[in-house]
Image: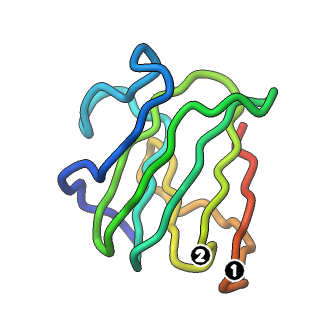
């Protein structure tokens, strides 16, 4: 599995300073939606870094430093890739909300 960057999804950044710069910049992770879904990005203290409403086929880079938590409305429909474009095994086989902690 590999990803192709698409136009960024609608995003409501709680802190614009933390906003990812561009799809090709130093992203640590890339999220790709395989269905319409939402994803909440938080730091280890639970502070909201981003709230994404993604359409099927959309990708968004994550450039936040440090550990993050991704909460998703449809865990089995969200693919997460590392900066080497390798699919991260999230073990989320559920159709409901899933929570993935990334280092």
State the image quarter where residue 93 is shown. Answer: bottom right
> Toward the viewer: 75 or 16?
16
Q: Is residue 28 left or right of residue 76?
A: left
Which residue was labeled with disc 1?
96
The image's colouring method is: rainbow
Where is residue 67 shown, x and y percent of the image? 71, 31
Q: Residue 74 carries which label?
A: 2
Q: Which residue is drawn at 48% across and 20% down?
A: 15
> Toward the viewer: 79 or 19?
19
Q: In this view, does 73 lie to the left or right of 79?
A: right
Q: Residue 20 carries which label?
A: none
Q: Is residue 30 above or below residue 97?
A: above
Tell whether label 1 touches label 2 (CB within 8 Å): yes
Q: In this view, does 70 lie to the left or right of 22?
A: right
Q: What element carries label 2?
A: loop
State the image quarter where residue 59 is shown. Answer: bottom left
């Amino acid at each position: 599995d590999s990803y192709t960057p698409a136009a960024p999804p609608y995003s409501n950044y709680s802190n614009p300073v933390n906003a990812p710069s561009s799809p090709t910049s130093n992203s640590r992770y890339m999220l790709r939606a395989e269905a319409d879904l939402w994803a909440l990005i938080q730091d280890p203290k639970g502070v909201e870094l981003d709230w994404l409403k993604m359409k099927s086929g959309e990708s968004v880079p994550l450039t936040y430093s440090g550990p993050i938590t991704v909460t998703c409305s449809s865990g089995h429909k969200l693919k997460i890739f590392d900066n080497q474009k390798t699919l991260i095994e999230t073990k989320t086989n559920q159709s409901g909300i899933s929570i993935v902690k990334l280092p």
